Amino acid sequence: MIVFLVHGYVLSNNAKLAWFTQILSSEIAVKSFFVVSGFLIFMSYENSGSMGSYFSKRVRRIYPAYFSIVVLCAFVGALFTNVSWTNFFSSEWLKYLIVNLLFLNFLQPDLPGLFSENPIQAVDGALWTLKIEVMFYLCVPLFVIAIRKWGRCPILLGTYALSLIYIVAVEVWGVKTGSIIYPALQRQLPGQLVFFISGATLYYYLDIFKHSWLWLLLPSIGVFAIKPWIPVAWVEPMALGVVVVYLACIFPCLGNFGKYGDFSYGIYITHFPILQVLISSGAFDYSPYFGLAVAGVLILATSYIFWHFIEKPFLKKSSHYLETSHG
């Protein structure tokens, strides 16, 4: 929802919504997503009977909804394009469909004549993180094999450190060269791995965390409190992990929201095209808050439909997502 609200301003470029970016951070929200992912995906692998079972669960969880939103955008986009259908269903359309279904949306993020007058033309720019997520899925078995051979602490701490080194090195080269490619590289797999590993670390040491959470939570909050004055980038990923896992696993309210259904994935993958359609139709020109409210209703409704009719039916009955929603 944080990403949706921030994108409401970014995509519409309406100054009245700028205040969202002053109190909310889509960057922190995405990093939190990677923390949660690290926690859950390592748990999924450790609870799987085989490699095949693990990958089957990953495909069942992520791909049905992903496939649906890509195909929906590719075909429903024809209703909103400003070019003829003959020009819309072109080789560019086919490329969009193929590369997006393969998680390579950066190769073709837009469709012919669709949202061409919007400030940003990408159809579903939020999908870039799913490419990283899939790479995480592929890496987890290798990490677990290494953990079982050399121990948790060396592998988790070593990976955390190497990811941080990559982030710093890319940032230094970006400053030296002035090239815009380096901030983009910093957002990719090696850089985001530090948040994924933070989630994994808290999964493996959850029992310890539950007994000493107060001594970890207070310093973690302190990291973000002093961040504007004292850079503490090397502990920020773990600090974020502590806050996120505390809210999900220890704080008495937020972790129970899953009993209503797991709508977060649906919200994330559907909000971008829904916002783009409303911006293109002039809803945000009429009133940015009206446009945002309509978008919110449509996104929640679509996410509800996605969960109950697309995501949930593909999950096994033993899935922890279903156990949570039944709890």
Image (cartoon, rainbow, N blue to C red):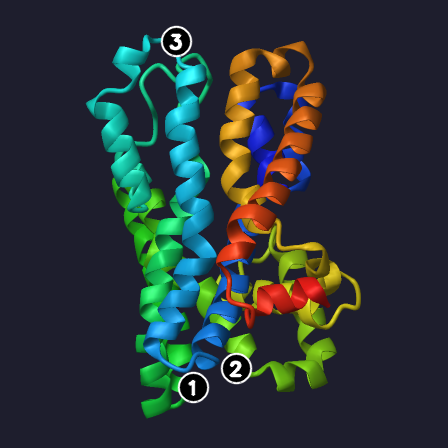
Total numbered badges shown on the rendered structure: 3
- Residue type marked 3: Asn
Q: In terms of image quadrants, where is residue 238?
A: bottom right
| 25 to the left or right of 117 | right
User: Foreground mark, 3 or 2?
Assistant: 3
Residue beneath the point at 45% across and 40% down: 126
What residue would you read off at disc 1?
A: 152
Report if the CB atoms under discs 1 and 2 are less than 8 Å apart: yes
Question: Element at badge 3?
Answer: loop
Residue beneath the point at 51% across and 33% down: 272
What residue would you read off at disc 2?
A: 204
Marked residue nearer the N-terminal end (3 or 2)? 3
Q: Which mark is residue 82?
A: 3
| Residue 22 drawn at (x, y percent) | 65, 36
Q: CA distance from mark 1 to mark 3?
A: 55 Å
| Residue 82 drawn at (x, y percent) | 39, 9
- Residue type marked 1: Arg
Report if the CB atoms under discs 3 and 2 are less than 8 Å apart: no
Marked residue nearer the N-terminal end (1 or 3)? 3
Q: In terms of image quadrants, where is residue 279?
A: top right
**Quarter containing the C terminus:** bottom right
**Above-or-below relation of 227 to 102:** below
| Residue 155 drawn at (x, y percent) | 37, 81
